[in-house]
Image: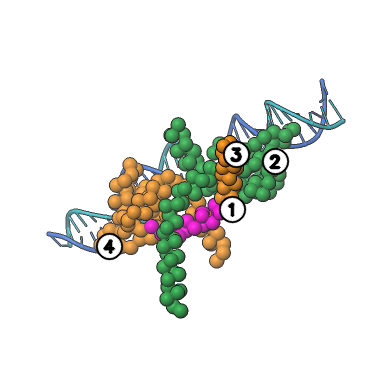
Chain colours: A orange, B green, C cyan, D blue
Amino acid sequence: MVTQSLKRREAVFRAIADPTRRQILGLLRGRAHTVNEIAGNFRSSRPAISKHLRLLRSVGLVETRREGTARICRLNAEPLRAVDAWLHDYRRFWRESLRGLKRYVEDAR
Amino acid sequence: MVTQSLKRREAVFRAIADPTRRQILGLLRGRAHTVNEIAGNFRSSRPAISKHLRLLRSVGLVETRREGTARICRLNAEPLRAVDAWLHDYRRFWRESLRGLKRYVEDAR
DNA sequence: GCTTTGTGTAACCATTTGGTTACAAATTAA
DNA sequence: TTAATTTGTAACCAAATGGTTACACAAAGC
């Protein structure tokens, strides 16, 4: 359903708004981690991290599989394409100002 | 100070997390608007929009100038470069999966 | 069976967030 | 000066957010 993917897109922006969640994604960019491994990188309690992971799973940014009692988390960057697509319409603005700056510098020679 | 620009970066992610604020930025992408013009596009009250604008100003995404009693708001996309830079490290992931898909499709011919 | 390990979740709490109404302030028009 | 226009802000409120502790549950080890 379109409505749901809109909500999903909406949720992705919320998901990456939190610095702890961005840091988790950063960890998973390197390799998959268990929940405990992830939690070990933060001061806050494991349940707090567990909640962040639940949210990241709900928007599809983290996928998991069981391995014994452990749960392996791995990154799925695909939902970030929504953010990238949103940014697309704004890039020309800072590119324009960059060209303006370039012109300014070149004219100064 | 570095700390401050880190906080600024942090705040930009928070700023674009809200759909109303993203919509405001979308409006300003077309042209500059007065506060009332912006508020006219939303159901919520003008003070609510005013608060959003204050936040957007605080992170530098909106800049204003007075014109009579009115206040003209215009977009400054520059702070979004922080988001773009953050995304940079994740693009290769969906590009990789895209290449995978491309290979898959090409192999099917 | 029982215990240990790793994880999820319920219940609760303080803070933040996004909204409202009422009012203040600044500029222009009369 | 007085009134009208446009905006900002203070005070308040409900809901969401991010954190905690205590406990439940599933898989592996004994």
Residue receiving disc 4 = A67
Q: Nearer the viewer, mark 3 or mark 2?
A: 3
Residue sitting at x 70%, y 41%: B34
Under tag 1, what secondary structure? helix
Residue receiving disc 3 = A107
Q: Amino acid at mark 3?
A: Asp
Circle 3 crowding by C-alpha within 10 Å: few under 14, some 14–19, many from 20 = few
Residue sitting at x 47%, y 58%: A79
Is A76 magenta? The answer is: yes
Q: Earlier in the sequence, mark 4 or mark 1?
A: 4
Cα separation between marks 4 and 3: 62 Å
Residue receiving disc 2 = B34
Q: Nearer the viewer, mark 2 or mark 4?
A: 2
Residue receiving disc 1 = A89
Q: Position of residue D21 (x, y in %)?
A: 31, 43
Magenta highlight range = A75-89
